[in-house]
Image (cartoon, rainbow, N blue to C red):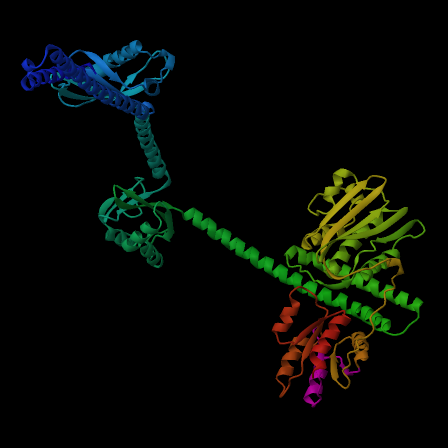
Amino acid sequence: MEHRNKKIFPILIIITLIAIFLMYKFIDFSSLSTETSITVVISCIVLLLLIFLIFYIIIYIRNKEKTKELRHRDQLFNSLVKNSDTIYLMYDNKNRELVYMTHNMYDVLGIKTNDINDKNEMTIIKEIFKSESLSSQLDSWDEQSEFLSQMFSYRNPSYQHTRWLKIKIYPFIEKKSSYYVILISDATKEHEQQHLLVSQASDIKTRERQLNQITSLSYDIEMDVNLTSQEFSLKNLKEDIRYFGDSKKGNCHDLLEILKKYVKEEDYRNVSTVLEPNNLEKLSNEQLNETTSIKYCLSSVEQEIWLESTLFFTTNKGEKHVTILTKNVTEDTEYIRRQNAILQSALKEAKQANDAKSEFLSIMSHEIRTPMNAIIGLSESVLADEINENVREDIENINSASNNLLDVIDGILDISKIESGILKLEEKEYSTAKFFKDIYNLTKERINQDKVKLILDIDKNMPTKLFGDNGKIRQIVLNLLNNSIKFTENGAITIKSKGIKHNSNVKLQISVIDTGIGIEKNKLSRLFDDNKKITNNDKNYIGGMGLSISGKLIDLLNGSIVAESKVGEGSIFTITIEQKIIDDKPIGDIDMIKIQKKKASNFKAVGKKILIVDDNKLNLKVAEKLLKPYDVITTSVLSGKECLELINNGENFDLILLDQMMPDMDGVETLNKLKTTDNFSTPVIVLTADAIVGVKEKYLSVGFNDYLSKPINVDELNEILKKYLQNN
């Protein structure tokens, strides 16, 4: 500001002299009076002063604006460097004084704000420049070129940690003055990173040495293939092992020649395909940093030696490498071979045992279900007739007991199915009232009604008809009831059920409540798990395999089962299963419902001829009775041979029901011979007591038109007859 003012005064003096000169040149004072002359002079002086004042004001305003702008720029610069890791200084080299410094000492050096003032700022700067490391670097500086120091440490008493700094000095000369622009930068992070890199490099070298030691111990041979230069090297890692001869160097193709010489011919083809240079290049592009292994056997050795080579793909200085590490795996290979042989033998034995079990179950199924067919079939036939109520009730009980006994038999067979994981759901529509009535009627006959009362408590709002596997649900409930009957000597057993509706489904809850001996709390979790150890004491609480099967069946049905009990008071078993609603109409009071057996179907097949082939006379009688309501003409024979004789003699039938398990000639053999007969086109339905899972599919695949299992279900028989006779 002073510098600019010094320039203003000479200009004003010059203007004043010019004004005086012009005034005396153009004004004739001799012609003017004294007063007028004085007035003119005063006017000129005032005008001159006015011009001077205006000029000064203009200069003042301009200087003020420039000062403001400079201050603004200074503030802007300081704000920009405030968060910087660099301190900016200007040093007057001629006068040996600091003329400017940015206010970010705290940010760069980490010194508390209240410790900073002009005096100790200079002290800190001097400390920095007097440090031994920086001083030695400055001693060799020519003070003309730019200066850049190496990193050096600085520690201020105001903070604990050492800072690492860098100094940059830019010298410049302005007229007769000499200045230094000095930059002090915090290089602590840079120093730490460099230190970390050095540590990591050292660690990497240590790990590399350890890896080489491990490699030399774990592997016998190291081969390296440089895919860029096509160079190859082989190094034996153990002095006494030379599977491929001495260590050597060469090109990629030498690798294949070595392997061809030492590897068995049948294995070499596979090895050469993997280690061929073009394939190595391909693998390197596809799976960089991944590994590939190949196993092969050596040739021309007395004892069989198996090697395994593992490929590691890496890139080093832009060149692709494949490192092939090879080791002896003869013992591992031999062990795997022995284990595979043992496994194959075990699998063969297991298959034979499974086949034997399946055959046994098939025979057992046939032998047990065949007499059951007669009992259920004849009772079904009787119930279709008009009989008095007392007889009907007895026959219904016989029929219901027979069906439940069949379920028990199927349950025994289900153990095998459960173990094999092939048990399937058999869902169908069923009557809710009949379902509970059947369970009630069967259980009623098995309890001592003088001491134990059986109660049926069914929610009146339960849907009339449901859809699901009611056979398995009934089996679960009967198992629970059997357990309650066994351990309840007095009181009551209650079958209680309710349904929680949700859209078109109902959550069916069935509880079996008894007043028996009860179960200890710590034993409840073991009731449904046959894998848990059962002690002699536990046998008082676990009723055989029934509960175990119930646990597995409830899982198959995606339901749940909960047991609650108090010793001396009784137990409550509750199952919950989701079922579909077919008829949402409430069943009402179940005690008022009379379960009427369905009459024979209105469907008639008058005049249709059906041939029944079965080696059991009672089963023939059952089939004839079940077919009687359809007004068909039945012919019965006791063997496949008699069946063939009828057909070969020109007898024509609209349908053949053919038993599978017959002596001399079974059903499949009979069917195959029937198909060789000229113009034979009669539908043949296999009639079998073999109910093992997958049997139906097996019989259909050998050529039977359809499948009926024994005991014959009336509804299934009706569907078969409709399918093959109604439209013919």
Compared with 93, 445 (above or below) is below
Can residue 223 be seen here? The reply is: yes
Question: In the image, residue 217 lies at what x, y percent?
Answer: 36, 38
- Work out which quarter of the rendered image holds the C terminus and state it: bottom right
Compared with 684, 411 (above or below) is above
Work out whether residue 59 or residue 257 is closer to the camera in this orientation and state it.
Answer: 59
Question: In the image, residue 285 lies at what x, y percent?
Answer: 32, 50
Work out whether residue 33 or residue 267 is closer to the camera in this orientation and state it.
Answer: 33
Q: How many marks?
A: 0
Compared with 95, 438 (above or below) is below
Highlighted magenta segment, given as a residue range = 631-660
Is 273 contained in the magenta span?
Answer: no
Q: Is residue 410 left or right of residue 309?
A: right
Q: Residue at x 30, y 39 (%)?
A: 239
Q: Is residue 391 left or right of residue 602?
A: right
Compared with 490, 418 (above or below) is below
Q: Is residue 439 left or right of residue 166?
A: right
- Work out which quarter of the rendered image holds the N terminus and state it: top left
Q: Residue at x 76, y 71 (%)?
A: 715
Q: Residue at x 75, y 42 (%)?
A: 524
Can residue 186 be seen here? The reply is: no
- Extreme-bottom residue of the structure: 650
Work out whether residue 724 or residue 278 is closer to the camera in this orientation and state it.
Answer: 724
Work out whether residue 136 or residue 14 is closer to the camera in this orientation and state it.
Answer: 14
Question: In the image, residue 554 lies at what x, y percent?
Answer: 71, 52
Query: Which of the 4 quarters of the picture holds residue 567?
Result: top right
Question: In the image, residue 95 lies at what x, y percent?
Answer: 17, 11
